[in-house]
Image (cartoon, rainbow, N blue to C red):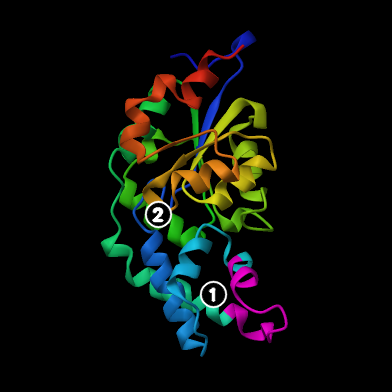
Amino acid sequence: MSPNGPGGRKRGVLFDVDGTLVDSCYLHTLAWWQAFRGAGLDVPMASIHRSVGMGGAELLEHLLPADRDKSGDQAIMSSHGAVFATFWPALRPLDGARDLLAQCYESGFAVALASSARKQDLDALRSTLRADSYLHAATSANDAKAGKPAPDILQAALDAVGLQAGDVVYVGDAVWDVYAAGRLGIPTIGLTCGGTSAAELLEAGAVETYENPRELLANLRDSAIGRLARSS
């Protein structure tokens, strides 16, 4: 499965991390819930989970009233970060995550992480994955003006590996991943291991879905990644 197009043009695969490669979506849900409670706000966990994958500022805009006093937003985001950091030792890769990254890398794709996480959280996630030798780049919320569903983080990843939107496929677990990639015309493979259903991911625009990284790896040749490798 050669990823090089006409004239040897390089191809790549971009990956979300939380809920896609690392089993962390529900830890983020709990961290946000505690941060909201600490600010005197009662936000249901189900609503929070549906918003995980957005950038922090975007998540607050999505979940909280527009007419709120926004002077406390930064404190809420800082509280979320502090609580989530206590979960770092509990982080675990999802089944097949490291093997999937390795296979894409060894097949000749440029491989990059494109995550809404803060840099310090992404560093913890990367430590959990132990797959840095299979990465060409990794971009976080620190590399973008706006978080998902804005496409800034994905554009930063494209720039980091020197590729165009038509040369890559994105792998993510949330509708916000699909929306962000769609704004750049990048096809998204949806994984349901972050807690979002296949139906929701497909409705948002994902080209196909798999249960987890292991299932995608088992079907890699027939997936959108395999089709990208064979495209002219």
- Crowdedness of circle 1 by 10 Å Cα count: few (<14), some, many (20+)? some
The percent coordinates of residue 171 (x first, y second) are: 49, 39
Residue at (52% x, 13% y) in the render? 230
Segment colored magenta: 59-74
In the rendered image, the quadrant that contains the C terminus is top right
- Disc 2 element: loop
Asked whether residue 164 appears in the rendered view, the answer is: no
Pick whichever, 28 or 43, lies toward us. Answer: 43
- Kindly identify which residue carries mark 2: 195
The percent coordinates of residue 46 (x first, y second) are: 45, 68
Q: Which mark is residue 219?
A: none
- Disc 1 element: helix
Query: Is 73 in the magenta?
Result: yes
First in sequence, mark 2 or 1: give its number. 1
Residue at (57% x, 59% y) in the render? 54
Please name which of the two marks, 2 or 1, marks the residue nearer to the observer: 2
Residue at (36% x, 41% y) in the render? 211
The percent coordinates of residue 212 (x first, y second) are: 35, 41
Pick whichever, 94 or 109, lies toward us. Answer: 94
Q: What residue type is labelled 1?
A: Met
Q: Secondary structure of the magenta portion, mostly?
A: helix
Distance from disc 2 to disc 1, alpha carbons, whole Å, reads: 22 Å
- Kindly identify which residue carries mark 1: 77
Residue at (50% x, 62% y) in the render? 50
Q: Do the residues labelled 2 and 1 touch (CB within 8 Å)?
A: no
Horizontal side of 199 relative to 90 (left or right) equals right
